[in-house]
Amino acid sequence: MKKFKAQGLLAVFVLSAAIAGCGVQGKPGNQTGSAINEPSPSPVATAAPKEREAIIYLTDTELVETVEKSVKLTYETDKDLVEAAIAALQQDAGDHTASLWQPIEVNSVELADGKVTLDIHLPDEARLGAPGELFVIDTLQKTLFQFEFVQAIELLVDGEETESLMGHVELEHPMKKQ
């Protein structure tokens, strides 16, 4: 008998909630200040994400040569494409390759008039010798300069132009596509 009462109360509660919800919708009198038969606003069209094949440049684990890795990047704007490429550049590479960008922290990415301004932070574990520093710069340039809209890269460390990224290789401000 208790089970029957509990089920009955539950059914009454669900039915009451459904009726209360239905009674509020669609009645012009319940909506103050609205016009009858007013068309609902159409949803704003958002750009569908695009997908692009790109090459991300890594190094071999011995730091002897660059290695190409094909990836699919999803983006909406050119800036999104640059950010996606940098994020892919920071991913663990595996297969006897190394991503020297993995420990580097990206503070910000800007794109204006064909110039990418990349502000980074270099934690101690990201600091390498001269060959490693050359590869960090080279892999960034090869990765970003493959995009036709990127003409220059301004690489900043903690918001500042520096003579060298890690103390071994002179850094151009900005690095220009050749």
Image: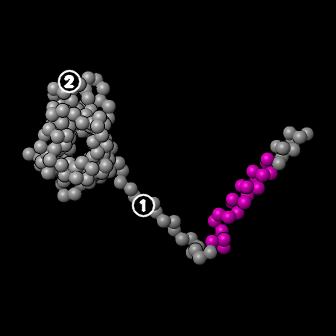
Percent x, y of residue 140: 20, 41
Q: Secondary structure at mark 1?
A: loop
Residue 20 appears in the figure: yes
Give the magenta range: 10-31
User: Within 10 Å of the Cα at label 1, are there few (<14), some (14-19), or many (20+) other Cα atoms?
Assistant: few
> Is residue 9 magenta-colored?
no
- Separation of disc 1 and disc 2 at Cα? 51 Å
Image quadrant where residue 126 sits = top left
Label 1 vs label 2, nearer the camera: 2
Image quadrant where residue 144 sits = top left
Residue 62 is labelled as: 2
Q: Is residue 27 left or right of residue 53?
A: right
Q: Is residue 171 left or right of residue 95?
A: left
- Report the number of discs: 2
Residue labelled with disc 1: 44
Location of the N terminus (image quadrant): top right
Q: Which residue lies at the image location 12% right of the left edge and 48% below the top edge?
A: 172
Residue 106 vertical position relative to residue 102 in the rendered view, above or below: below
| Of the image marks 1 and 2, the number of the one nearer the N terminus | 1
Q: Which residue lies at the image location 12% right of the left edge and 43% below the top edge?
A: 170
Which sits in the foreground, 164 or 94? 164
Which sits in the foreground, 1 or 163? 163
Location of the C terminus (image quadrant): top left
> Is residue 28 magenta-colored?
yes
Percent x, y of residue 96: 26, 23
Q: Amino acid at mark 2?
A: Glu
Q: Secondary structure at mark 2?
A: loop
Residue 47 vertical position relative to residue 94 in the rendered view, above or below: below
Q: Which residue lies at the image location 27% right of the left edge and 50% below the top edge?
A: 158
